[in-house]
Amino acid sequence: MTDALITEPAAAPAVDMRAPAAPAPLGPRPGPRLGLALAALALGGFAIGTSEFVAMGLLPQIAAGVNISIPAAGHVVSAYALGVVVGAPVLAGLGARFPRRTLLIALMVAFTAGNVLSALAPSYSMLVGARFLAGFPHGAYFGVASLVAADLAGPERKARAVSRVLLGLSIANVLGVPVATWVGQTFGWRVAFAGAATLAVATAVSVGRLVPWAPADHTATLRRELTALRRPQVLLAVATGAIGGGGMFAVYSYISPILTDRSGLALSAVPVALAIWGLGMVAGNLLGGRLMDWRPVPVMFGVFLLMAAMFALFAVTSAHAVIALPTIFLLGMSVILPTGLQMRLMDVAGDAQTLGAALNHSAFNLANALGAWLGGLVLAAGWGLTAPMWVGVGLSLAGMAVFAASLGLERRG
């Protein structure tokens, strides 16, 4: 991560969606330490991504461990997602008065506690509660970390800095989740959650040592942060992510049967395909930050159109194993969208920066629920394994329409 972000930003003004409200200053730039600070923040994303997605790969082991069915074990995943949706605005609003570095450490401590409780949970009900608690700090952490990264990097490179924070989540899909899944299958699912807790502790220590301290914004109040929820542009940005991002999950949720039953891949090759999707996410993060710093509005429209085109293409290429895999890589690059929406929320939240930034992951967990539900709906209707891909096309174009409407309203005043 110690790349061009480490250098002092150029003097040219950035092209932004709109003039953002200035966040609380973080003091002098850390210069050569910027890359290390971003790496510490990204480590938190890696820990969160590993913990979130490993549960999906360990559902049979979890079900056997607490004596429930596999469908019931799926509620463990749902409980985490619900924790993200609820926790992001609550913790961001309550924590806005704290110094951001202190808040980040506190959020990682809470995430550690949720994973420790998950590893120790003796019953199904306690495990569901523990996963809800583990998801609670998720959105607030990414929101606050994005604000810190953007302020450290400066206006000319803030999208690239934010993309580095989200990069940890993408790398988790390539390295963290496969390793944690293997650990859980070999040594028990509880060990996998304990490993996620260890990563969270390492994040808290790294953030404390490498992220510059800054004084708290004592003017921040819960009431002021909650004003973000009354801003039409904030709500439209959340709707853009919840609808436009749903296509990713409509396809990703059913990628295993698509690859085995339609593409003809062996079940043992599915993890390889998922790793290819994760590599596409990494590439999307690295590319998306630079593009969003360059021309954010045209790039957002381009991402929606590219996503719709790639889902339509996958409806064709998924019938052939050899060409399905390169398409999967391109589908993974749709992670550019969360970077763009993160910047949009930070720009339109006004002085409710903390809560506004935290809503990005609430939006994409809503997208997860919407996409998986609609994808399952068309499959249950008997429309075939290509049907979720056409759902993805529709949701991508619908998200673009919401984004266009928000820009139209903004330009009218």
Image (cartoon, rainbow, N blue to C red):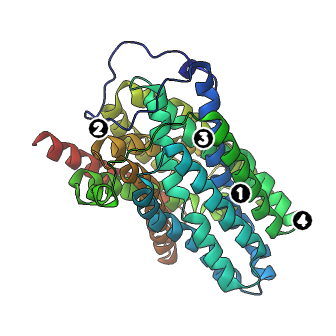
Q: CA distance from mark 3 to mark 4?
A: 29 Å
Identify the amino acid type marked 2.
Ala
Which residue appears farthest toward the left when viewing the image?
Answer: 412
Q: Choose the circle earlier in sequence order: 3 or 4.
A: 3
Residue on which the image places disc 1: 264
Whole-percent x, y for residue 51 in the image: 68, 59
Q: Choose the circle earlier in sequence order: 1 or 3.
A: 3
Residue on which the image places disc 4: 187
Q: CA distance from mark 2 to mark 4?
A: 49 Å
Q: CA distance from mark 1 to mark 4?
A: 31 Å
Mark seen at residue 30? none
Q: Do the CB atoms of the residues marked 2 and 3 lie less than 8 Å apart?
A: no
Camera-nearest residue between 304 and 380 = 304
Camera-nearest residue between 172 and 310 = 172
- Would residue 321 appear left or right of 299 to someone viewing this image? right
Q: Choose the circle earlier in sequence order: 2 or 3.
A: 2
Secondary structure category for the residue under label 1 = loop
The answer to whether one can see residue 125 in this image is yes
Identify the amino acid type marked 3.
Leu
Camera-nearest residue between 108 and 4 = 108
Residue on which the image places disc 2: 21
Residue plotted at (70% across, 80% down): 70
Residue plotted at (41% across, 47% down): 308
Where, quadrant-wise, is the C terminus in this rendering?
top left
Q: Choose the circle earlier in sequence order: 1 or 2.
A: 2
Q: Nearer the viewer, mark 1 or mark 3?
A: 3
Residue on which the image places disc 3: 41
Secondary structure category for the residue under label 2 = loop
Whole-percent x, y for residue 186 in the image: 89, 64
Q: Choose the circle earlier in sequence order: 1 or 4.
A: 4
